Amino acid sequence: MFQQTPCHVSSCLKAELSSFDDSGNIIGTGGYCLDHIPDPEKAKQDILAYISAHEKIIGLNASGITFCDLDFSGKKFYGCNFQHCTFSNIKAEEMRSRMSVFDFSIFTDCNLLKSNIQFCSFGGCTFSHTLLTGSDLVQDNFCGLKAFQSSFDDTDLYNSRFIKADLIDTSFRNCNIKKTVFWEIKQENASFKLSNTREAEFDRSGSELFSTAGLS
């Protein structure tokens, strides 16, 4: 798991950004978060350059960065911190991630088709027009997710968590949702057609949501 070191400003609770040596390698700490680093644009460009130059990214702290119109397809992220980031028009087909944190980030018009993302956290995220179709999203945290016109179709969601998620015009068709927890979700035009809903938990007693009422 990534190591989150707080910003050097004593009153700030945000995580410091990764910094790099002259060869472009991560060197432990950057000292400051995005709000307090002396040159935030340079910090952002350094992070983008590092991701672009590496297929495997380990222990990167990019908290708060905005990523637009980029291709992360085939990238592998291990133990990275992407909390409070914004991802807009990102193509990330067949992306792989383990033990990374994306909490409170915003994904808009993103394509993560056929990705393999396990043991990661998307708590409090917003997904808008985001596609995760055909992916492996095993033992991930989506608690508090707000999803709008997004798709998880044909995805393995084994033992993931969607507690208190808002699912609006969002599809979970033909998914493996065995042991997946959907407690206290709010749904509007959400579809679970052809998914194994009897093996998921839609209330705290472990029974199927409304005995299949409301699922389509």
Image: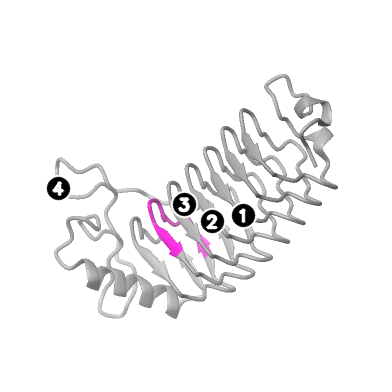
Horizontal side, residue 151 vs residue 107: left or right: right
Instruction: Please give the range of residues in magenta.
Output: 77-87
Instruction: Work out whether residue 44 or residue 86 is closer to the camera in this orientation and state it.
Output: 86
Q: Earlier in the sequence, mark 2 or mark 1?
A: 2
- The reply to whether discs 3 and 1 touch (Cβ–Cβ < 8 Å) is no
Horizontal side, residue 214 vs residue 143: left or right: right
Q: Earlier in the sequence, mark 4 or mark 2?
A: 4
Circle 4 crowding by C-alpha within 10 Å: few under 14, some 14–19, many from 20: some
Where is residue 67? Give x, y as percent: 40, 67
Separation of marks 3 and 1 at Cα, in angstroms:
20 Å
Looking at the rendered structure, the kind of residue marked 4 is Val
Q: Earlier in the sequence, mark 3 or mark 1?
A: 3
Q: Helix or strand or loop: what does disc 1 sit on?
A: loop
**In front: mark 1 or mark 4?**
1
Looking at the rendered structure, the kind of residue marked 2 is Ser
Where is residue 202? Give x, y as percent: 71, 29
Separation of marks 4 and 2 at Cα, in angstroms:
34 Å
Where is residue 100? Give x, y as percent: 49, 53
Q: Is residue 189 visible?
A: yes
In the rendered image, the quadrant that contains the C terminus is top right
